[in-house]
Image (cartoon, grey):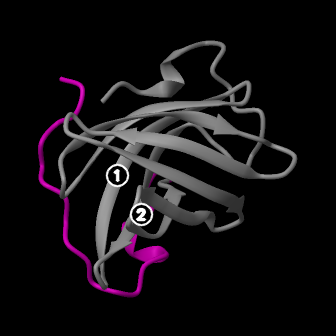
């Protein structure tokens, strides 16, 4: 995965949306599924890539640093998933949707250097495969 912090002008507009590695889960069919991603938050836009148990994906969307709202599309080779969330101290919480009938919740948070994924997660969830995204 490409590190968004490599760009000199990629500083985030808000401390609530730091660019870099994010981890978390999405809820589907009664269970939680881990996901990890590298995200760049810059000038109201979100771009990135990641992996979960479905596979590799790309992210493109928007955020509002004042209202703390986020909207993005998670694009797999086979389909798109639409996310809408709200940023707060513990990351971004919200819902995902695959129209017309599939939807669920999610929570992601920045993974700071040295921080384990278990800090925010009390429930055991499936680990994404170890495929390297973006190589």
* Residue closest to the far front: 100
Lateral position of residue 98 relative to residue 31, left or right: right
Name the residue: 47% across, 67% down.
106
Q: Quadrant of the C terminus?
A: top left
In the rendered image, is residue 23 in sight? yes
**Residue 38 % position (x, y):** 42, 38
Distance between the alpha carbons at the discs numbered 2 and 1: 6 Å
Q: To which residue does mark 1 refer?
A: 36
In this rendering, the answer to whether 87 lies above or below 63 is below
Image x and y of residue 90, in percent: 63, 68
Q: Position of residue 77 (x, y in %)?
A: 21, 34
Whether residue 16 appears in this view of the structure is no
Q: Are marks 2 and 1 in contact (CB under 8 Å)?
A: yes
Which residue was labeled with disc 2? 24
Name the residue at 69% across, 58% down.
87
Q: Earlier in the sequence, mark 2 or mark 1?
A: 2
Image: magenta residue range: 112-135
Q: Nearer the viewer, residue 45 or 36?
A: 45
Lateral position of residue 128 relative to residue 25, left or right:
left
Tell me the quarter of the picture where residue 24 sits. bottom left
């Amino acid at each position: 995965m490409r590190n968004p912090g490599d760009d000199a002008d990629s500083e985030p507009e808000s401390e609530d949306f730091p660019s870099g590695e994010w981890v978390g889960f999405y809820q589907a069919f009664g269970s939680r599924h881990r996901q990890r991603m590298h995200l760049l938050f810059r000038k109201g836009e979100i771009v990135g890539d990641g992996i979960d148990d479905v596979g590799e994906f790309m992210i493109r969307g928007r955020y509002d640093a004042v209202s703390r709202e986020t909207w993005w599309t998670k694009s797999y080779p086979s389909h798109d998933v639409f996310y809408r969330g709200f940023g707060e101290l513990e990351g971004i919480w919200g819902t995902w949707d695959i129209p017309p009938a599939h939807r669920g919740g999610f929570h992601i948070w920045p993974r700071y250097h040295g921080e384990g994924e278990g800090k925010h997660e009390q429930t055991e969830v499936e680990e994404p495969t170890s495929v390297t995204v973006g190589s």
